[in-house]
Image (cartoon, grey):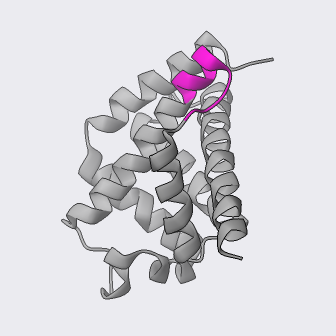
Amino acid sequence: MGFTEKQEGLVKESWEVLKQDIPHSSLRFFSLILEIAPGAKNMFSFLRESEEIPQNNPKLKAHAVKVFKMTCESAIQLREKGEVVVADTTLKYLGTVHVKSGVKDPHFEVVKEALLRTIEEAIGEEKWNEEMKNAWGEAYDQLAEAIKAEMKNHHDETA
């Protein structure tokens, strides 16, 4: 069974809510990542030098928005094309950056958990349900698989 129109709709609907307070959602997203995996702090150049998560850091906000938006776009692509399609240059860049930052498979799970919890908190318990969680989870998983494949390509090319 492919990604359904309903799943795509759930992702788009919650993305609209999430977009309304990106500064808060971004901060919450990174707070959750560090709550789940404190050691991940050094993987983010914009967090390495600070004792706490900077409230108004434009790089933090930009990174969170990329994760949110790319996951949302993945949902749309899954529905339309049956797969996640990321531009080659973007995918190459993501693969390289993630390899250089020392990202491993378990880190993707940390980000997924933080993403899902951030969305749940942003849209509220009354709208959050298993279907929405699964839709975002599937979209994220497919995006993560594309990035992991490119990370492997990067390893193979530099080995």
What residue sits 57% from the left and 33% below the top? 85
By secondary structure, the bulk of the magenta-drawn segment is best described as: helix
Magenta-span inclusion, residue 82: yes
Q: Which residues are magenta?
A: 75-85
Q: Is residue 60 above or below residue 24?
A: below
- Give the vertical position of 49 relative to 147 (above or below): below
Classify residue 82 as left or right of residue 94: right
**Where in the figure is residue 127, as x and y percent of width and height?**
50, 26
Which residue occupies the foreground of this view, 126 or 104? 104
Q: Is residue 103 visible?
A: yes
Residue visible at 74% across and 18% down in the picture: 2
Image x and y of residue 80, in percent: 58, 15
> Left of 73 or right of it: where is 80?
right
Left or right relative to 8: residue 55: left
Which image quarter holds the N terminus?
Answer: top right
In the picture shown, does residue 64 fall above or below 87? below
Measured along the vertical axis of the image, is residue 125 above or below residue 150?
Answer: above
